[in-house]
Image: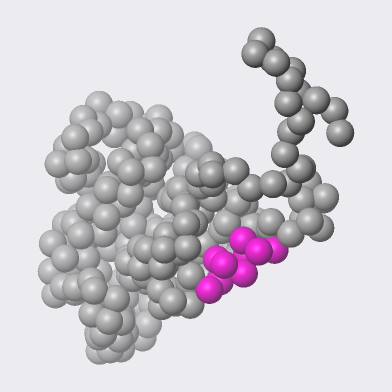
Amino acid sequence: MSEICGPDGCEVPAAAGGALPLERVPARIDVVSDAICPWCWVGKRNLEGALAILAEAGERFEVHWRPFQLNPDMPKEGVERDSYRAAKFGSVARSRELDAQVAASGRAAGVEFRHALMLRTPNTVDAHRLIRLAGMQGPTVQDKVVEALFVGYFQQGRDIGDRAVLAEIAGAQGLDVAAYLAGDEGTAEVLQEDMGFRRGGLSGVPTFALDGHVVFSGAMPADRMADAFRRALAILRSPAARAAE
């Protein structure tokens, strides 16, 4: 075994692979999501619970939010929600049955849906542009904006397809985005990324990826999410996976 020499002398290094008391680099989680997807908000809350469980074992993660449109053909101005969902699900009554199911799952996850306040189904391209811009300020800022959009739409019934509304939501998080939203910057990138996920076979959200590898889709409970990420981490850290890099 060779020596390591410096200005103060030489020493024999510790055995290769020995553990040092260094903080582990955070793993990256990408969440493919839409701002009007109720299961994405439930999934976000369950993800927060999963990350807390994993943190107890010293695992750290950096979360990034990626764009997907549930309604890629939605008019720019959006549509009246009841009529849209009646056409999609067969009747207003059926739509409200589905809303009740979502609300029950939301309560179990600790989020409250107020469907009676939701009057429009918006186009979400501009919301995704905002999320993308917030991501450039770092994961913490992006997370706050994503949460604010969910609250704005699902609890306050705000039209998050309206650029003025988006500017107000972003402003409450310390971002001045009115000029940005007034233009088209970021639109092509959002649409390209959305289409890329579709071409890759993605058809539903939320979808969760770890270091670029899809782990699961859906808003499963926090403990099951934590288990799924543990298994994925074990595979990605295995000697076989590292040798293939």
Question: Residue drawn at (70%, 16%), measured in percent from left and top?
Answer: 9
Percent across and percent down for residue 71 are: 42, 62
Question: Which residues are drawn in magenta?
Answer: 227-235
Residue 52 to residue 27: above or below: below
The colouring scheme, among rainbow, by chain, secondary structure or one colour, is one colour
Q: Quadrant of the N terminus?
A: top right
Question: Residue drawn at (38%, 43%), measured in percent from left and top?
Answer: 139
Q: On the picture, is 143 further left or further right than 171? A: right
In this rendered view, identify the residue nearer to me: 52 or 200: 52
In this rendered view, identify the residue nearer to me: 127 or 56: 56
In this rendered view, identify the residue nearer to me: 198 or 51: 51
Residue 176 to residue 196: above or below: above
Percent across and percent down for residue 100 are: 25, 85
Secondary structure mostly taken by the magenta-highlighted segment of the chain:
helix
Residue 204 to residue 59: above or below: below
Number of numbered discs overlaid on the protein picture: 0
Q: Residue furthest right?
A: 1
Q: Is residue 189 magenta?
A: no
In this rendered view, identify the residue nearer to me: 108 or 79: 108
Q: Residue furthest top?
A: 7
Q: Is residue 93 visible?
A: yes
Question: Residue drawn at (22%, 33%), measured in percent from left and top?
Answer: 175
Question: Residue drawn at (47%, 52%), measured in percent from left and top?
Answer: 61
| Occupied quadrant, residue 5 | top right
